[in-house]
Image: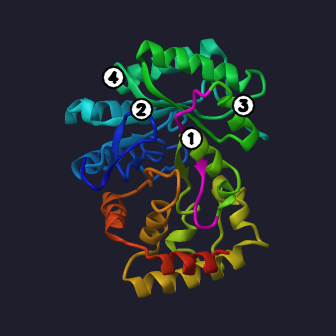
Amino acid sequence: MNNNTIKVGRTGLEAFKIGFGAGVVGNSMMYPKVDDNLSRELIRAALKQGINFIDTAYLYGLGHSEELIGEAIREHGGREQLVLSTKASSNPQFNQAGIEVDNSPAALRKAVDDSLMRLQTDYIDIFFLHFPESRTPLSEAADVLAELKLSGKIKAIGASNLSFAQLQEFNSAGHLDVLQAEYSLLVRQAEADVIPYCLEYGISLIPFFPLASGLLAGKYKKDDVFSDVSRMNNPLFQQNAYPANLERVDRFKAFANDKGAEPAQIALAWLLTRPAVDLIIPGATRPGQIESNLQTLSVHLSEDELKQLDIIFG
């Protein structure tokens, strides 16, 4: 292992500290500007730069992201050096309350088999329960994934989008290896309960929205209007919170400027200093962003600088 490769919690998997979050790949429903050719270019760029952790989900293009990644990996070769993670959202129904999924044992078994087929592989390194649902107890869903782990179809068990109580229920038999949860300089609730719990049970935390839906990249202005659902529904972008968040980000941009780094690189480097966080999975909509994300690894934050960031975002 080199300095930029880590062991992912207790999974036995080794991965580069910066993975590729493939949320835009094959996901034209949410990212109409990213077509299949650009999607392929992004996966190839990540692999070419030495990134070996790719995170996707059925929900990204309803399987199309997995298909494009499967094609790219077959072309690239070296499957055993890669860490692939995907997430189940069987039969997703979109309604006003959000998304409804099916986590029944039969649906989860089928979801794993379908993902294996689309990814053109015979095992998935980390398989995540993408969303909880009210019909299937979370402990039962975890037991099914534990059976699939025993069978060799998946190497590690993950879960995402769980409240703290749901996290405890999912992990009641100690099956959980990796958790994906929202965590960034602007959203730090995980520090109160999720991170101590992960440390206690040896669970690796992978943050999602590491740049707070782009706020921490420092590109937004006061009069920007957001029409995409993810930002319109995001508390950080609500009228009462948005101006205050922009003020914090302005101070953060000055901090990054003094440091000679991009704000996004500082935000990602900060996450890599956090307990329980082994790796991060920023996304990209152009190949150059992948290279920029990787430059995060050359950003070192001193204790004093970490305190300054706490003051800015306190």
Residue 51 in sight from this viewpoint: yes
Which residue occupies the foreground of this view, 151 or 217?
151
Residue 99 in sight from this viewpoint: no
Label 1: element kind: strand
Residue identifier under label 3: 169
Q: Which label was assigned to residue 121? A: 4
Please give left or right for residue 303 compared with residue 98 in the image.
Answer: left
Disc 4 residue type (three-letter): Thr
Q: Within the magenta stretch, is there residue 258?
A: no
Mark toward the start of the polypeptide (1 vs 2)? 2
Where residue 205 sits in the image (x, y, percent)? Answer: 53, 47
Is 3 located above or below residue 222 in the figure?
Answer: above
Q: CA distance from mark 3 to mark 4?
A: 30 Å
Mark toward the start of the polypeptide (1 vs 4)? 4
Label 3: element kind: helix
Q: CA distance from mark 3 to mark 1?
A: 13 Å
Residue identifier under label 1: 179
Mark toward the start of the polypeptide (3 vs 4)? 4
**Crowd around label 1: few <14 · some 14–19 · many ≥20 (10 Å):** many
Disc 3 residue type (three-letter): Glu
Where residue 213 sits in the image (x, y, percent)? Answer: 57, 60
Residue identifier under label 2: 66
